[in-house]
Image: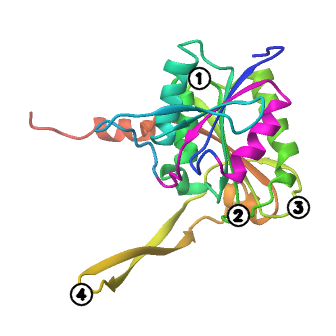
Amino acid sequence: MSTSHPTILVVNDDGITAPGIKALMHAMKELGKVVVVAPDSPQSGMGHAITIGSPLRLDKMELYDDIESYSCSGTPVDCVKLAVTKIFKGKKPDLCVSGINHGLNNSINILYSGTMSAAVEGAIESIPSIGFSLDDYTLQADFSHCIKFVKEIAEQVLQNGLPSATLLNVNFPNTHHIKGIKICRQANAKWAEEFDERHDPYKRPYYWLTGVFQVNDKGEDTDVWALENHYASVVPVQFDMTAHHAIPLLNNWKFNT
């Protein structure tokens, strides 16, 4: 897929004023016409949540000079849905990019990520989509060393397209000396979660989620390995969650009904 002046939808989960989305929109501005639709407040960890029990608001903003931008009261997925139906009115953009997220979305984190869920929703809408994340959770994060890679990856997707029902999960290490790009698989890793119990003034317990990220994968072809070795990781992701390899096994089960 190649177009002379593509239209690019920019979304995120950190909110419309986050430094990461500013860096991403300015990078995409060099590749085509940018439209920004982002949450009006941080929505990290929302996964693929959508708003169904309350109304949504979509307000046009004058935040970024000549970049058309909208603030949405809903989730990152809501942003994509409203963009496609109400802003683009069914004439879909040529590319959907999400981020740049403050914090990694490698390995199992993709399941919890609002950043990646927005990109997944773009792919569900048959829009070539990419999620970008940086290993820096601070509002002072410096995205400058990511930009050339962001543009190169986006250009490749615009030129070549992506397989049906597939999107890209791109993560950057927190270093100004990124060695290059590695095409990877998702590492086998998970959070070993704990809940820190505390008590309010009325002696009622409340809990803070904490935990340690455990990597159970020594492979040198994973996103975790790439990031630890100062490469940008690119993992092709699909939203068909069927465990196709398990179907023959289940077909051998003996059901009584």
Q: Residue beneath label 2, please?
A: 136
The reply to whether the C-beta atoms of the residues labelled 4 and 1 are less than 8 Å apart is no
Q: Would you name the residue on which mark 4 appears?
A: 203
Residue drawn 60% across the image and 43% down it: 12
* Element under disc 2: loop
Amino acid found under the numbered disc labelled 4: Lys
Return the x and y of residue 1 as percentages of the image width and height.
75, 16
Q: Under tag 4, what secondary structure?
A: loop
Residue 22 percent across, percent down from the top left: 74, 45
Identified at 49% across, 68% down, the residue is 191
Which one is in front in this view, the residue at disc 2 or the one at disc 4?
Answer: 4
- Front residue of this view, candidates 210 and 70: 70
| Crowding near the residue tagged with mark 4, few <14, some 14–19, many ≥20 C-alpha atoms within 10 Å | few
Q: Which mark is residue 24?
A: none
Query: In the rendering, which numbered label is found on residue 176?
Result: 3
Q: Magenta residues?
A: 17-45
Q: Is residue 220 above or below residue 248?
A: below
Specify the label residue 164 is tagged with: 1
Earlier sequence position, callout 2 versus callout 1: 2
Q: CA distance from mark 2 to mark 4?
A: 36 Å
Q: The residue under label 3 is which amino acid type?
A: His
Discs 3/4, front = 4
228 lies above or below 235: below
Residue type pointed to by label 1 = Ser
Among numbered discs 3 and 1, the one appearing first in the sequence: 1
